[in-house]
Amino acid sequence: MRREIGVRMKLVMVGVDEKGRSFVRSESSLSVDEPHTLWFGGVPSIRSALARLDPGAALSGIEPEAGDIRWRLAVVEAGAVASLPEMEDAFDDDGMHYTRTADFDFVVAGEVVCRLDTADIELAAGDAIVLPAARHAWIAGEVGARILCFMVRPHD
């Protein structure tokens, strides 16, 4: 998964199907030697995705309040599945979870697999992924990963 810095980045857009399963909607490879708009427009509609998921199963402990944003740095240790000890019960056994937010995530360092219901996506430093209320898990590679997570929660 390693590559030279300054060559390309992966941009993955995730969706939620009619059964509530997360899937890859699109995947692009972009040159980092020229400017790109990675996202333009309003907050992705997550209402339809949320209607297909159990509202009681959301990982609410890290969500911003309705109408707010949260910007956080997630640390996933080498070979680990991301979880938060204080919220362990909110994660499925395999680390799968979702929030009632549109997440714009950027891998700052390391390597990580973003597991969806229908696919595993390998991401490395410099890659980005958009998760609109989509079930997912983070599984770090040999060196661990640091992920900037920009979470936007629309008004209810």
Image (tube, helix red, strand yellow):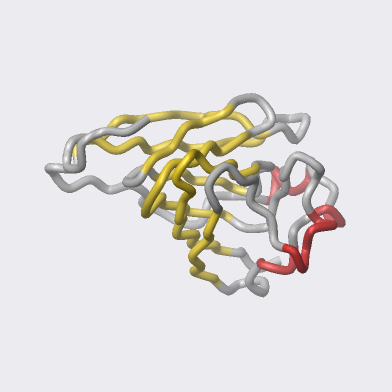
Residue drawn at 26 percent across, 33 percent down: 3
Q: How many marks?
A: 0
Q: Residue 53 location in percent, x, y? A: 80, 44
Q: Residue at x 54, y 71 (%)?
A: 69
Q: Residue at x 81, y 42 (%)?
A: 93
- Horizontal side of 76 relative to 88 (left or right) equals left
Measuring from the top left, give residue 9's x and y in whole percent: 29, 38
Q: Is 12 drawn above or below residue 110 in the view shown?
A: above
Q: Quadrant of the N terminus?
A: top left
As drawn, is 74 to the left or to the right of 55? left
Q: Nearer the viewer, residue 71 or 66?
A: 71
Say whether residue 87 is left or right of residue 28. right
On screen, residue 74 above or below 82: below
In screen coordinates, is 126 left or right of 138? left
Residue 94 in picture, x, y percent from top left = 75, 39
- Name which residue lies at 51% across and 56% down: 43
> Farthest residue in the left direction?
33
